Image (cartoon, rainbow, N blue to C red):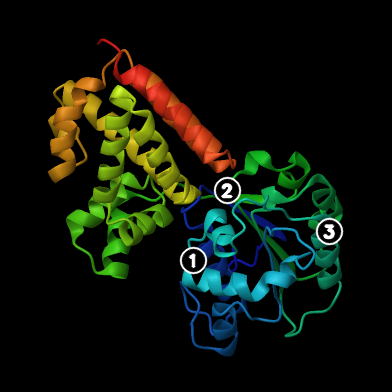
C-alpha cells in the first residue's frame, strides 16, 4: 500500500487474539515513519524507527481499553504502563493488559472522554511534518457514545492522518464504524510457524514446541503462556486428571478444594485449562475410532488418553464439548469462576458416567 502510494485513511486489522495483528500494526507504522525504507521492511536504525520501536514517536498516538477510576480517565493516564507491557509482550491480550494492572474484575472500556481526547490530538499539526497516526487497540470496547463521536473524523480525517484500528471482535463494532474502514483479516497462525517462533524465542526442543503449538489453537500468545508458565501440557494434564477423578465420583470436599485453587489462577489460565480439555476429548474420540495416528498428544498424555478414552464416546462427546466451550465463553465474560467450575464439575459427572 505504502509503496504504491495508496494508504487508506482508516485501516482495521482484525483477527483472533494471538494472531499478530497488534505487532503487525506497529511494524507497519514503523515502516510508514522510517526515514530509510528498505524494499520489504523498515531500516530499524533511523531516529524515527528507534522512536517508533519504543512507542514514543511524537506523531504516534495510542488508545486502548482502561479500567475507569478517579485517577484513570483516558489512555494517557496509563500510557507508560501500556508501552512497557507491549514491549515485553507484543502479542498482548486484554487479559494480559488488565492482569498487569490488577484490574481483571473491572470492565475494559474506551469511554467518551477518550473520543474527545482523540479529536483534540488530531486537531494539531504533526510534530515531524509527516503522518499523524492514531492506533485504537480493541475498538470494540468503545461505548456507543465514544464510537459515535468518532464517525465524522473517521470518514473525513485531517490530511495525512491515519487511523489504525486493531480489533479481535469486529462483530461487536457498530456497522457505521466498519463501513468507514478498510479491513485486513488475520487468520490463526499455522502450527509450523508457532513452532519456529517458540524455538527461536525460548530455545526449546522442537517436540515440546510442537506439543504446545497444537494446544494453542493458532494463538502465539497462548503458546507462549503454555510454554513459559505451566511447563507445557504436563501441568495441565495433572490438573485435568484431578478434575476428572473428582467428577467421576463427585467428591464434594475435593471439588471445593480444586475450585478454590483454580479460582486463584486467573482467567487466562482457566481458559487454557478448558482449551486443553477440549483437545483431550478430541484425542480420546480419535483413539476410540482407531485413528491413533491422529492423536496429537504423546508420552504421558497419550498414556492417559488410552485409559481415559473409555469415558468419552459418541453419546457424550458433543455434550462435553458444549459444556467446556460454554464455560470458556463465560470465563471470558467475567463469570464467577467458583460457581462456573462447580457447575461444570457436576455436569461432567453426569456426562462421563453416561453409558456408551
Locate residue 58: give its quadrant.
bottom right
In front here: 73 or 290?
Answer: 73
What SS does tag 1 mark? loop
Locate residue 244: give its quadrant.
top left
40 up-or-down from 138: above or below: below
Q: Nearer the viewer, mark 3 or mark 2?
A: 2
Q: Residue furthest top?
A: 355
In 3D space, how far apart are the residues under numbered discs 3 and 1 (Cα atoms)?
28 Å
* Residue placed under numbered mark 3 in the picture: 153
Q: x and y percent of residue 43 in the render?
A: 48, 82
Q: x and y percent of residue 71 in the render?
A: 77, 68
Q: Is residue 320 left or right of residue 6?
A: left
In 3D space, how far apart are the residues under numbered discs 1 and 2 (Cα atoms)?
15 Å
Disc assigned to residue 90: 1
What SS does tag 2 mark? loop
* Residue drawn at 51 percent across, 40 percent down: 337
Asked if residue 35 shows in the view, the reply is no
The C terminus sits in image quarter: top left
Q: Earlier in the sequence, mark 3 or mark 1?
A: 1
137 up-or-down from 337: above or below: below
* Residue placed under numbered mark 2 in the picture: 168
Q: x and y percent of residue 303 in the render?
A: 13, 37
Q: Earlier in the sequence, mark 3 or mark 2?
A: 3
What SS does tag 3 mark? helix
Q: x and y percent of residue 288 in the render?
A: 18, 22
Locate residue 305: give its quadrant.
top left
Amino acid at each position: 500500500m505504502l509503496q504504491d502510494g495508496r494508504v487508506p485513511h482508516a485501516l482495521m486489522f482484525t483477527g483472533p487474539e494471538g494472531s499478530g495483528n497488534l505487532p503487525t500494526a506497529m511494524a507497519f507504522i514503523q515502516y510508514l515513519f522510517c526515514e530509510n525504507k528498505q524494499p520489504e521492511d523498515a531500516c530499524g536504525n533511523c531516529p524515527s524507527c528507534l522512536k517508533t520501536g519504543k512507542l514514543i514517536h511524537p506523531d504516534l498516538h495510542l488508545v486502548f481499553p482502561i479500567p475507569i477510576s478517579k485517577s484513570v480517565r483516558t489512555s494517557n493516564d496509563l500510557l507508560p504502563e501500556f508501552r512497557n507491557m507491549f514491549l515485553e509482550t507484543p502479542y498482548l491480550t486484554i487479559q494480559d493488559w488488565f492482569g498487569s494492572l490488577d484490574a481483571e474484575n473491572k470492565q475494559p472500556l474506551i469511554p467518551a472522554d477518550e473520543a474527545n481526547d482523540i479529536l483534540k490530538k488530531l486537531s494539531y499539526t504533526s510534530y515531524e511534518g509527516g503522518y499523524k497516526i492514531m492506533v485504537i487497540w480493541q475498538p470494540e470496547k468503545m461505548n456507543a457514545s465514544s464510537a459515535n463521536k468518532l464517525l465524522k473524523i473517521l470518514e473525513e480525517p485531517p490530511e495525512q492522518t491515519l487511523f489504525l484500528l486493531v480489533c479481535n471482535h469486529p462483530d461487536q463494532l457498530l456497522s457505521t464504524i466498519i463501513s468507514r474502514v478498510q479491513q485486513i483479516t488475520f487468520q490463526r497462525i499455522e502450527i509450523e510457524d508457532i513452532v519456529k517462533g517458540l524455538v527461536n524465542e525460548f530455545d526449546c526442543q522442537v517436540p515440546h514446541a510442537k506439543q504446545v503449538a497444537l494446544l494453542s489453537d493458532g494463538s502465539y500468545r497462548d503458546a507462549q503462556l503454555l510454554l513459559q508458565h505451566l511447563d507445557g501440557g504436563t501441568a495441565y494434564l495433572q490438573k485435568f486428571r484431578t478434575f476428572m477423578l473428582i467428577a467421576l465420583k463427585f467428591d464434594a470436599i475435593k471439588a471445593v478444594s480444586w475450585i478454590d485453587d483454580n479460582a486463584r489462577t486467573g482467567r487466562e489460565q482457566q481458559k487454557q485449562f478448558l482449551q486443553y480439555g477440549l483437545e483431550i476429548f478430541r484425542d480420546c474420540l480419535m483413539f476410540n475410532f482407531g485413528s491413533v495416528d491422529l492423536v496429537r498428544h504423546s508420552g504421558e498424555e497419550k498414556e492417559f488418553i488410552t485409559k481415559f478414552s473409555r469415558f468419552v464416546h459418541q453419546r457424550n462427546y458433543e455434550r462435553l464439548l458444549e459444556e467446556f466451550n460454554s464455560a470458556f465463553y463465560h470465563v471470558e465474560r467475567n463469570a464467577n469462576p467458583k460457581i462456573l467450575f462447580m457447575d461444570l464439575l457436576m455436569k461432567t459427572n453426569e456426562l462421563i458416567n453416561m453409558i456408551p
